[in-house]
Image (tube, helix red, strand yellow):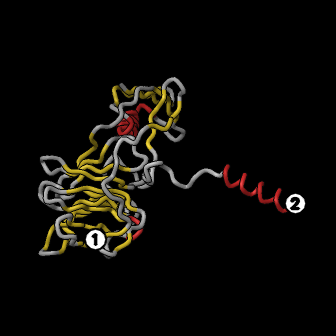
Amino acid sequence: MMKKTLTLLILLCLALIPSLTLSANGLPYRTFTYSRANDRFVYTQDAYLPLSVSYDLAGMTLNEPEDITIDQHDNVYIADRGNSRVIKYSLGDDAVTIIGEGVLSEPTGVHVGIDQAVYIADFGNKEAYKFVPDGADYVLKTTYQKPIGTPYFTDNDPFEPTKIVTDQGNNVYLLLAGNINGMAEYENSGQFFGFFGGIRIYFAFYVHFLFVHDLSDNAFEVGQRLRYAFRRLGDVHRVRVRDLHAFVHFR
């Protein structure tokens, strides 16, 4: 009797364990939609059904793939983060090319430009790269690094590219983790020249300066420092220095 009861308990427990299959149609993911009425995400029908699911390409196993793109010649590019490489896979003949081996650390973004170069954002190296075709291989052409000597970045500011894209003018845009200024914009040659699509911030606050003793002589210098210090937070509208306090208003 005890044995039969134990068997029934085990079967009951197994029945209560949720299935490891995440979707009834065999997909390795579920699709959600936001319910305004319930104020939460709820399951919904699958928006897209894959033609196939691949865990390896031409015998190479993927490890934490982070991004994917495809060019006009039906070549698929995969940022294979865990293996520190980008894989180029031809849908036509199953040919595979490895890009960035020995250079990349943690590629998290990949893009093919109008110049047919491959642009890669590397979260691990904290840089981005442009690789150009060289016969059947790709060679490093340009590196996009954290700018130096600009009010947009201090020495302590992180520079962690996650995604990368180019426009019709072949300018390069980097999405930086944790940065609210927008996308870092570069000339194709690697020269940084600002941010695109930043968030405007509307607020005012006070900053106290403990080490400014003679404001009549240093007011302009303090104002200039404020402009540089807070330029990345918004457009400085007015700077006033008064009674050891600086009032900064952003529009």
Q: Quick one: 102 or 32, which is closer to the camera?
A: 32
In the displayed structure image, the side of residue 243 where residue 239 appears, left or right? left
Q: Can the viewer see residue 105?
A: no
CB under 8 Å between discs 2 and 1:
no
Query: Residue type at mark 1?
Result: Gly
The structure residue drawn at horizontal position 53% and vertical position 32%, both measured from the top left corner, is: 40
Circle 2 sits on which residue?
2
In the depicted structure, whether residue 40 falls above or below residue 101: above
Q: Residues within 10 Å of mark 1 (few under 14, many from 20)?
A: many
On screen, 203 above or below 123? above
Q: Amino acid at mark 2?
A: Met
Q: Residue at x 26, y 45 (%)?
A: 194
Q: In 3D space, how far apart are the residues under numbered discs 2 and 1 (Cα atoms)?
A: 63 Å
Element under label 1? loop
In the rendered image, residue 52, in percent from the top left (x then y), is placed at: 32, 58
Local SS, label 2: helix
Q: Quadrant of the C terminus?
A: top left
Q: Which one is in front, 23 or 194?
A: 23
**Above or below, comparing residue 225 to residue 2 in the picture:** above
Left or right: 222 as drawn, with respect to 194: right
**Residue depicted at 18% across the width and 57% down the height:** 71
Q: Which mark is residue 100?
A: 1
The image quarter in which residue 53 lies: bottom left
For label 2, the crowd category at 10 Å Cα-Cα, with few meaning under 14, some 14 to 19 and many 20 or more, is few
Q: Position of residue 118 (x, y in %)?
A: 21, 62
Which sits in the foreground, 152 or 15?
A: 15
